[in-house]
């Protein structure tokens, strides 16, 4: 196919540099489209992006907010990278985060666990909570062929109303003067922070370790080999005698558990109580889908993409404060980015080549050979 | 453009591809290829995979632009920039992989992109034309049938009708028989002859010698991007053509050493199973395969061969009956249990099930053995053992790949099959279940795979060979199991087998 001097050719495996270019262009297009929203709010898009960048990237006090938002995105995102590699379309990280938060709250407020081991126990309980929430749709899919996109999505609502019910009902804190919160966590159940920031560093370390661990799992272990075969070609996995149930369960224990850890971080590090579900998560479970998609199957790349989405979340605060825009505008951003990324997917499998001068009259053989000699490809 | 022909010269050929050169990065796919196609002939383009046949017709059809040379139609040079130009000039192509909308009817598919039809309900208008052309060329197909309900050979007829309705005078058929049974191929040849009688020219791409000799008028043999020769089919024979294609003599009947029976590799008793639609596909099949013996399974596609292979290899449940491998009962075990009993499986659809295209050649070489030593140590893979094994296999089975780290999908069909054979045969299996091991492969690859199977036989493995290529079954087998309608019609020792007798059994008639 040819458009002016450009020739478009199909290819099967895009090099990483082209993937990066296409992804950046998609994000740029999304930001340009978001500019229309600023404009409709009476704010010049250029000024808006100026304010956002100076308020986040170039502001020493705001910079840690990017990392703070990146922590849950990284944990949930790495889990989704793994799930997507196994071709399990987990849209349920949001619910898995909430279950992790709920389990951690139980440990913090209602369990007889001694103070000394309370924090580790919260992380373990949160992991288990998220894992259980992730394993249920996996079992439904493999035993009864229930589509996991639907079941994981619906599980999010169950989790949402479960948390909502708890904070309005049985777990409603008597000290909270009628607000729908639990009581505040005791000090022994609060995750330590880096001073003057909201970065709860133990959760951050868990996220980084998880990214490295999943990368190692995929590249170097038998289980990782099975996950890759299962995800790339389920037919070949059957032929190779790989048990899809075992593979999927493993993947969803890790993915759900990782999202659960993110939930522990939010209640144990930031809020110190269980509260309204939309305030616990801010949509991290959905934004983690973008983190995973941008990372293109690489757990380590998710560190970078989580920071990028963290920037978007942090800029939401800037937009609200400096530009008086509704806080939910970040959801619009996330939606536009995901939309453009998925839309750009096809572009990965084409390459563009500069080959001017082929229009016009029939060239002689010598001319044709001269203008078509290979070179300048890629 | 020069157009006037000097009056004293004979009429120019219908089509002349003159000195066509086409390069891709790193290869010259066509090197000054000249082919002359006359009206009313079937012109075969014969060559191994990678000889440049498909590139040449893609140039003719406007998918590729040549780097040099020209195309003359009735003596006039033409520029074909896109398939649209080709169709306009009367050149049509039936692709290897059909481009049909499965939910639409035949007539609707044919209407798509057809000019000069009514805006509303154009399919009604062409139905009559479809029936007419169908009668004339023996391309009977119901214009109102949805495409998904058609067999592969009927879908191919729709593609041919599509080209004819667009006024194709020159019809390119790219490996048309690779998806057909032998009987369906005969039907296609009849259609091709009808078309040439009506004055069309047919360009027939293939690497199957028997087909070329059966249907072509003239043959152009290509090797490594160059024309070896163009010769009339009357003057050609199989051995000469093979030598021209491959560049050396080819062994059609590889030597078979006698082997002594060494015990039973496989016993199947009263096996029943259902197909994907829940209908009975196997009805009480019983036979054995001895070690050191090749048992060929002959039959028209869809008579239970696929289900039989799947039940034996643990991919499908038997509803009744038993399967023993080396005396061990593996009935309804999973694929892994059968694998561990010592069964190698060369699957029917090598791209869909035999490899993981996105994973490397090395990883694919251990696809069914990664969990055993030395490729795994505990829960961890052993990359150096995998890499070392890959190096050895690439050398031993001459898999052409620049690197063991290349994704397997980048390999050619023959090399993918070599990869699968390397993986399956290197473990010294006691039983090899080979389903259509050479379908779609060229002569060299086929020859090599036959040699490998025979060598495994001499080393004492039992081999169950399922193939639609009756010649392959007759050449390699010690005994032949003929299947029809999910039943064994007869088990014939190869020495007593002849095509006639097997052919009758394949159609369900017991002599």
Image (spheres, rainbow, N blue to C red):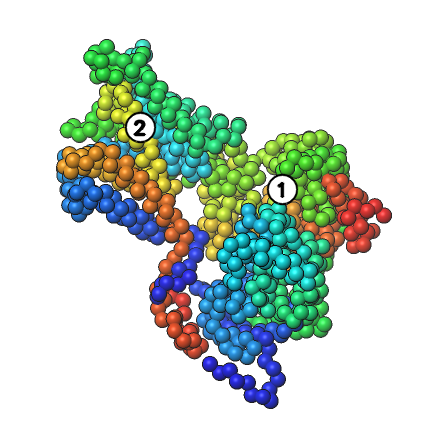
Q: Tell me where residue B277 sits by quadrant.
A: top right
> Residue at (23%, 42%) from the top-left corner?
A37
**In the image shown, does B365 or B412 lie closer to the viewer?**
B412
> Residue at (80%, 44%) from the top-left corner?
B490
Q: Mark 2 points at which residue?
A: A262
Give the chain letter at badge 2: A
Residue B349, percent from left and from top: 59, 47
Give the chain letter at badge 1: B
> Residue at (31%, 22%) from the top-left corner?
A101
Q: Does residue B470 appear in this view?
A: yes
Secondary element at tag 2: helix
Alpha carbons under labels 2 and 1: distance apart:
46 Å
Q: Tell me where residue B395 sits by quadrant.
A: bottom right
Q: Classify 10 Å Cα crowding around label 1: few (below 14), some (14-19), many (20 and above).
A: many
* Res B344 label: 1
Residue B49, relative to residue A130: is it above or below? below
Q: Does residue B448 appear in this view?
A: no
Residue A231, percent from left and from top: 47, 39
């Amino acid at each position: 196919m040819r458009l002016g001097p450009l020739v478009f050719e199909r290819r099967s495996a895009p090099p990483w540099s082209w993937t990066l270019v296409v992804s950046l262009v998609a994000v740029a297009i999304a930001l340009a489209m978001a500019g229309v929203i600023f404009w409709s709010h009476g704010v010049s898009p250029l000024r808006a992006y100026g304010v956002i960048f100076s308020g986040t990237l170039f502001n020493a006090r705001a910079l840690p907010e990017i990392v703070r938002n990146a922590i849950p995105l990284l944990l949930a995102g790495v889990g989704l990278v793994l799930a997507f590699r196994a071709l399990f379309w987990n849209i349920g990280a949001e619910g898995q985060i909430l279950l992790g938060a709920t389990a951690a709250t139980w440990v913090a407020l209602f369990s007889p666990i001694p103070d000394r081991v309370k924090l580790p126990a919260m992380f373990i309980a949160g992991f288990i909570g998220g894992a259980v929430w992730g394993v249920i749709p996996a079992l439904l899919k493999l035993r009864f062929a229930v589509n996991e996109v639907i079941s994981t999505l619906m599980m999010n609502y169950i989790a949402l109303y479960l948390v909502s019910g708890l904070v309005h009902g049985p777990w409603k804190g008597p000290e909270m003067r009628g607000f729908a919160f639990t009581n505040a966590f005791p000090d022994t159940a609060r995750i330590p922070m880096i001073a003057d920031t909201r970065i709860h560093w133990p959760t951050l370390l868990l996220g980084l370790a998880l990214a490295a661990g999943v990368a190692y799992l995929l590249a170097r272990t038998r289980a990782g080999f099975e996950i890759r075969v299962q995800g790339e070609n389920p037919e070949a996995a059957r032929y190779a005698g790989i048990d899809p149930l075992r593979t999927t369960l493993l993947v969803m224990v890790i993915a759900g558990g990782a999202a659960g850890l993110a939930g522990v971080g939010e209640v144990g590090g930031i809020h110190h109580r269980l509260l309204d579900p939309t305030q616990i998560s801010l949509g991290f479970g959905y934004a983690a889908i973008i983190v995973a998609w941008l990372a293109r199957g690489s757990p380590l790349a998710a560190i970078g993409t989580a920071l990028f989405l963290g920037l978007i979340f942090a800029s939401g605060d800037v937009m609200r404060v400096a530009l008086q825009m509704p806080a939910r505008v970040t959801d619009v951003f996330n939606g536009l980015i995901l939309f453009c990324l998925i839309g750009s997917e096809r572009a990965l499998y084409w390459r563009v080549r500069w080959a001017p001068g082929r229009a016009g009259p029939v060239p002689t053989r010598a001319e044709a050979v001269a203008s078509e000699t290979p070179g300048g490809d890629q | 453009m020069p157009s006037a022909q000097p009056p004293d010269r004979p009429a120019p050929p219908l089509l002349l591809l003159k000195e066509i050169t086409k390069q891709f990065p790193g290869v010259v796919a066509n090197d000054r290829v000249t082919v002359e196609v006359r009206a009313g002939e079937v012109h075969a383009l014969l060559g191994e995979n990678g000889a440049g046949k498909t590139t040449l017709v893609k140039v003719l059809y406007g998918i590729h632009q040549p780097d040099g040379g020209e195309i003359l139609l009735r003596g006039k040079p033409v520029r074909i920039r896109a398939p649209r130009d080709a169709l306009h000039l009367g050149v049509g192509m039936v692709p290897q992989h059909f481009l049909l909308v499965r939910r639409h009817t035949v007539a609707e598919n044919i209407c798509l992109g057809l000019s000069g039809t009514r805006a509303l309900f154009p399919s009604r208008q062409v139905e009559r034309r479809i029936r007419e052309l169908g009668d004339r060329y023996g391309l009977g197909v119901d214009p109102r049938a949805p495409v998904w309900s058609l067999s592969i050979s009927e879908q191919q007829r729709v593609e041919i009708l599509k080209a004819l309705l667009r006024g194709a005078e020159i019809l390119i058929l790219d490996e048309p028989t690779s998806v057909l049974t032998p009987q369906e191929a005969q039907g296609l040849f009849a259609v091709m002859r009808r078309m040439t009688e009506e004055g069309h020219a047919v360009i027939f791409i293939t690497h199957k010698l028997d087909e070329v000799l059966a249907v072509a008028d003239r043959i152009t043999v290509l090797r490594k991007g160059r024309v070896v020769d163009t010769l009339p089919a009357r003057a050609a024979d199989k051995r000469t053509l093979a030598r021209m294609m491959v560049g050396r003599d080819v062994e059609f009947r590889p030597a078979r050493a006698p082997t002594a029976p060494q015990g039973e590799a496989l016993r199947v008793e009263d096996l029943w199973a259902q197909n994907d639609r829940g209908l009975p596909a196997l009805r009480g099949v019983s036979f054995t395969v001895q070690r050191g013996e090749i048992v060929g399974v002959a039959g028209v596609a869809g008579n239970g061969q696929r289900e039989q292979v799947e039940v034996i290899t643990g991919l499908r449940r038997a509803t009744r009956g038993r399967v023993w491998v080396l005396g061990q009962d593996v009935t309804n075990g999973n694929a892994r249990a059968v694998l561990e009993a010592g069964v190698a499986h060369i699957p029917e659809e090598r791209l869909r099930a035999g490899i993981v295209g996105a994973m490397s050649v090395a990883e694919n070489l251990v696809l069914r053995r990664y969990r055993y030593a030395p490729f795994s140590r505990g829960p961890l893979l052993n990359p150096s053992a995998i890499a070392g094994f890959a190096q050895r296999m690439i050398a031993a089975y001459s898999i052409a790949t620049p690197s063991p780290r290349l994704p397997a999908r980048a390999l050619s069909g023959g090399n993918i099959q070599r990869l699968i054979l390397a993986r399956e045969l290197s473990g010294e299996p006691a039983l090899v279940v080979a389903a259509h091991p050479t379908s779609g492969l060229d002569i060299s690859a086929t020859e090599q795979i036959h040699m490998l199977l025979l060598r495994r036989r001499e080393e004492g493995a039992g081999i169950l060979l399922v193939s639609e290529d009756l010649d392959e079954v007759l050449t390699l087998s010690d005994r032949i199991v003929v299947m029809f309608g999910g039943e064994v019609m007869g088990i014939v020792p190869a020495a007593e087998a002849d095509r006639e007798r097997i052919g009758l059994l394949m159609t369900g008639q017991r002599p």
